[in-house]
Amino acid sequence: MQDFIYYAPTKVYFGKGKENEVGNIITDLGYKTIMMQYGRDSIKKSGLYDRVMASLTNSGIKVIEMGGVEPNPKLSFVREAVKVARENNVEMILAVGGGSVLDSSKVTAAGAKNDCDVWDFILRKETPQDALPVGCILTISAAGSEMSSSSVITDTETNMKRGYNTDFNRCKFAICNPELTYTVSKYQTSCGIVDIMAHTMERYFTVCEPTDLTDRIAESVLKSVITAGKTLLTDPFNYDARANMMWASSLSHNDLTGCGRQNMLPVHQLEHGLSGEFDHISHGAGLAVLFPAWARYVYKAAPERFAQFARRVWDVAETDDEAAALRGIEEMEKFFEFIEMPLKLREFGIDKNSVDKIAELTTFGKSRTISTYIELDYHKVKEILESCF
Amino acid sequence: MQDFIYYAPTKVYFGKGKENEVGNIITDLGYKTIMMQYGRDSIKKSGLYDRVMASLTNSGIKVIEMGGVEPNPKLSFVREAVKVARENNVEMILAVGGGSVLDSSKVTAAGAKNDCDVWDFILRKETPQDALPVGCILTISAAGSEMSSSSVITDTETNMKRGYNTDFNRCKFAICNPELTYTVSKYQTSCGIVDIMAHTMERYFTVCEPTDLTDRIAESVLKSVITAGKTLLTDPFNYDARANMMWASSLSHNDLTGCGRQNMLPVHQLEHGLSGEFDHISHGAGLAVLFPAWARYVYKAAPERFAQFARRVWDVAETDDEAAALRGIEEMEKFFEFIEMPLKLREFGIDKNSVDKIAELTTFGKSRTISTYIELDYHKVKEILESCF
């Protein structure tokens, strides 16, 4: 087991109706003026917006609204939000939504407390020295941003989609009511499943000394998500399945599934190149295509690891490691197909001519490689992308 | 899944040599005067004391020492420590040791910041409104106190051993170096194994709606502890096994293994009656005798739950739930025997005449019952104890 620091200080309020407590929670923390970020109209249509506003105003909290966060949240929006937060002396940011709203809120929170431009965090030119606290009301089980240290935003001028990690990105609190995910579409539910699995599997597939407990916890998250995912396909109002998915979302990305292991997210890096270039591609759907392709490209570097995954997660009986490894990847792909995810890039309406551009974005203009088992330079990234057609 | 709050804010520094960073960690938190609690001579013999003091003094930290914490830490010691902490304007408490030192430190930390006597917390007459921060350097994998909200102390005048829970009991940081546990004896290593398993199993065996993910995580902790426990019996210097045990200790009692379930610790309550009366009984050894006895007394109330435990943790193949349940309890007992734990109360040199007194202590003089599956009053507690001879 490698040395590690584990720090997941987010207070999670999990269960039915917990969003109605948000006013009290924020009052107990001592904040009086907050910025509330959210996406488009869905929280208004569902009634969530009204419930949250009622709880906040009943507690006498002044709310500065920043609605309109888009999927793959945009740098320009964050810059505007930072300006508004400063002008209004906002004390904390409440994100009501999913990963995009959360990530936008996190970067805004850091931007409001540091003098530089927020893109400098992304470019590693600056490190946040402080940040406003962020709390959230989660509406989709997917990104795990509610407990993670990460945030990802996109600069639409360059199509660069990129993230940075800091403990300031850890939410102060997360309100997780599984019922709020009842209205998430089948497609987006499946995208969430893949994202949760990817967060778990990318920590699992790293070069490391033995980490028995972490392995078993990761396998537990995967098995539980697979089981719940199958249930939700036909029974989207199954509370326990929605609850398992929501809790798995948080645990998959709060570092628990990677304790003592390397922390690399190679397939996420590939996917950021893809959905950076093609804004219409949902992150989870992109991962569903890329993960099996990446796994087939690298598995020979660690057949015993992929075999353990196959046997413990997918109950593959093969005794030969290489054969088991391949069968495990196949089972993963079959499951993605079962939950109606795309398996090939052409299903997004894009063709092989896009490969150069995606590979270029992924490698930051050929300036970086992506590591785990095999170091992926521009040319190897291209090979993986080409295998997705 | 029941509603729950999950809050585990302790920053864990896990790995080799991390104790040498303690001075920097405390300085970064801004504390200059600390109380250091520890047990008897073992940290001096092992050299740990010197390393910790070197790190603290190099950082210019003033250290008030309170050595001499005993196993089953005593109320009288804590009262004295509170007085010393107040007189010296101590800003935080550093516990260097295991569960006893931690629990003593936690109660001292609350005592120093509240005007009442600390026993009033135990008696529920007062609730801590504040507490000094507590950090720890862990030297044994067992109690899980390094991430838990609990603390247990003993009043030697009445032999009452009792605890209370509060978020103020959550450590600010925990330094966990598995190498520090190399010198833990075989017997105490095994006691720790049972304690970790009990924290996990007592959350597992509760009446609840389905909690698939929590179940699987609990089963993972158990399987990993069993595997590591078998290794340590013959190979006590196996780093990965020691590391798995240490991390399992933290996860077993930071509430992760009980999310969405009831939080009852019936066997711990029985054991507090036992080791409250008989100070020479190690907590884990007491649990090893009591757990199978309790399980056999209640399993018919939830055979399917005990059967799941048997099948998933002990690979029992029985298809009939009741038969599987019994086989699972038997396997647990066999494992305790394998790691050289006692199976009967007489092995502690006590006889059946003690049963009345233990049952009385357990039920606070027949004034409380202990619940989970079957509500245990004084008479039922006696029946369980009698079955341990």
Image (tube, coloured by chain):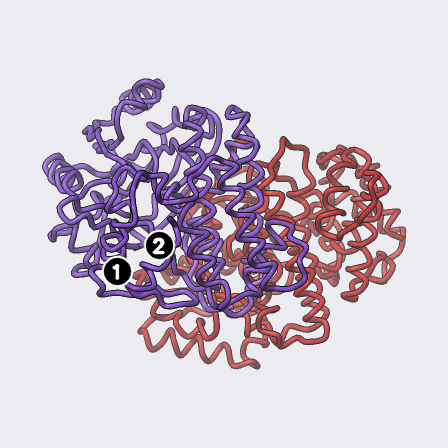
Chain colours: A red, B purple
Residue at mark 1: chain? B
Report crowding for label 2: few under 14, some 14 to 19, many 20 or more residues within 10 A (C-alpha).
Answer: some
Mark 1 belongs to which amino acid?
Answer: Thr
Are tags 2 and 1 found on a single chain? yes
Q: CA distance from mark 2 to mark 1?
A: 16 Å
Q: Amino acid at mark 2?
A: Glu
Establish if B263 lies above or below A23.
Answer: above
Where's residue B378, x and y in %?
28, 63
Report x, y in % for residue B339.
50, 36
Q: Is residue A324 left or right of residue A79?
A: right
In the rendering, which numbered label is found on residue B386? 2
In the rendered image, which quarter is residue B213 located in?
A: bottom right
Q: Residues within 10 Å of mark 1 (few under 14, many from 20)?
A: many
Dividing the picture into quadrants, the one containing residue B56 is top left
Q: Residue B344: x percent and y percent?
A: 40, 44
Q: Quadrant of the N terminus of chain A?
A: top right
> At 76% across and 52% down in the image, what residue appears?
A315
Q: Residue at x 21, y 30 (%)?
A: B68
**What residue is shown at x 24% (from left), y 38% (from top)?**
B92
**Residue linked to disc 1:** B363
The reply to whether discs 2 and 1 touch (Cβ–Cβ < 8 Å) is: no
Q: Nearer the viewer, residue B151 or A233?
A: B151
Q: Position of residue A205 (x, y in %)?
A: 69, 41
* Residue B27 position (above or below residue B299): above
Secondary structure under the numbered disc 1 in the rendered image: loop
Residue at (56% x, 34% y) in the render? B230
